[in-house]
Image (spheres, rainbow, N blue to C red):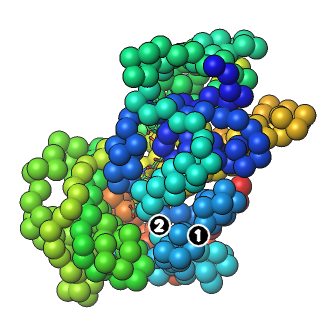
Amino acid sequence: MRHQVVIIGGGPSGLLLSLLLRRKGVDAVVLEQRTRAYVLARIRAGVLEQGLCDLLREAGIGKRLNAEGFVHGGTLLAAHGKQVHIDFKALTGNSVTIYGQTEVTRDLYDELDRTDAPIYHEAEGVEIHGADSDAPYVTFTHGGTSHRIDCDYIAGCDGFHGVSRRTIPETTRRDYEHIYPFGWLGILSETRPLQHELVYAGSDRGFALCSMRNAHLSRHYLQVPLTDKPDDWSDDAFWAELRRRLPAGLAESLETGPSIEKSIAPLRSFISEPMSWGRLYLAGDAAHIVPPTGAKGLNLAASDVYYLSRALIAHYAGDDDHLTSYSATALARVWKASRFSWAMTRMLHVFPDEGEFLRRMQGAEMDYLAGSQAAQTALAENYVGLPY
Ligand code: FAD
Ligand code: DHB
């Protein structure tokens, strides 16, 4: 079997890359180790930057996003006794859109199906061969049969635990990592969102975030110790703790109800350099992870896919410049978004091993933000997404 590009991983990065390439006549196959139902059931991100929305529209799947996405022109930060509304629209002229990763993935699958794009689900034992040669190929097992696909390029879109990054020799690769001493407990509930915009709350008891998926579906998060398990938290305990972490005026209006999903995610910052090796190119979580504060994970995956699709399309039109510069171009944006996610995490969480000095610094930062339009603009321009 032969395809121009083999994409490993059928999460948002791999599916979007496949669709953008197909639109320009580049032939790509996707290998995904899980079932489609499993991929579609993963509840993750919900805040889309303008750049990602534009990319989805360019890929021809903007219809449902335009009809069902909620445009948010701002957000509220509440911490250290201050409430600061960041008006994205007024400060940057830009906004973000609330539209779940599950919906993005569904739209991508529907469109790929419509165009008969090749996707192997439950592809087992995927291995990359000869990525540093002119004749790379990928082997895997599907339905008990062994397969080999020869190709020009391999796109590693297989997330943090995938095989692609680990194929790059350790002598070439450098990983940068920071682990945070807490996780986020998230629940999804069929309740009214707290406000019409997101609320980021930093209390002495820890961080809380009130987000949403639509007018009847809320997504809320609590900072919890890494040792906690979702089963340790009854719904009642979750709501009671969320109330305690919100400013009194807001806590009163919180609508509660049974959770329909509950999970804990650890927080880490991770960046692997370079993002390419020979004919292998990494995109999305395969190359980097950000802590969720500020909602950058999916959006960074999208900017990688933008740069990589542009580079591969240009290659087949006879221009290799973008392929050569892909890693450096993508990493420049990755480091800046990672800095923002790290800074937001640092500003709003309680760090159990750090003392009163950090708490006072966080208070000073909120105070500065409250009184400085320049500081608010800096936050807003990062939140809505730096330009591609
Ligand atoms: P993934 O979504 O991880 O997709 C990779 C795909 O590759 C998966 O489908 C996987 O099954 C497949 N795969 C893995 N290994 C192999 C293999 N060997 N062979 C074949 N296929 C393989 N971001 C936000 O912006 N906001 C959030 O609230 C948020 N919450 C998150 C919560 C959790 C629990 C996690 C894990 C992430 C969260 N993120 C969030 C991050 C965001 O979801 C990711 O950045 C985004 O999914 C990245 O997309 P991706 O396609 O690069 O990777
Ligand atoms: C969501 C997650 C985030 O990390 C964030 O900063 C905002 C929203 C969400 O899942 O809705």
Q: Is residue 262 left or right of residue 313?
A: left
Mark carried by residue 63:
1
Q: Marks 1/2: CA distance?
A: 12 Å
Q: Residue at x 48, y 53 (%)?
A: 105
Ligand 2 is in which quadrant of the figure?
bottom left
**Residue at figure coordinates x 53%, y 76% from the top left:** 67
Ligand 2 within 8 Å of the CB at mark 2 = no
In front here: 185 or 188? 188
Label 1 packing within 10 angstroms: few (<14), some (14-19), many (20+): few
* Residue 18 sits above or below residue 174 on the image: below
Marks counted in the figure total 2
Q: Quadrant of the N terminus?
A: top right
Question: Could you say which quadrant of the image residue 156 lies in?
Answer: top right
Q: Amino acid at mark 2?
A: Tyr
Residue 251 lies, with reference to residue 53, above or below; the image says: below
Task: Name the kind of residue labelled 1 in the image.
Answer: Lys
Query: Which quadrant would the C terminus be assigned to in this image?
Result: bottom right
Residue 195 placement, left or right of 309: left
User: Which label's residue is closer to the chain start, 1 or 2?
Assistant: 1
Give coordinates of residue 102: x percent, y percent. 42, 56
On the rendered structure, is 66 left or right of 325? left
131 or 211, nearer to the observer: 131
Q: Residues within 10 Å of mark 2 (few under 14, many from 20)?
A: many
Which residue position is annotated with label 2? Answer: 99
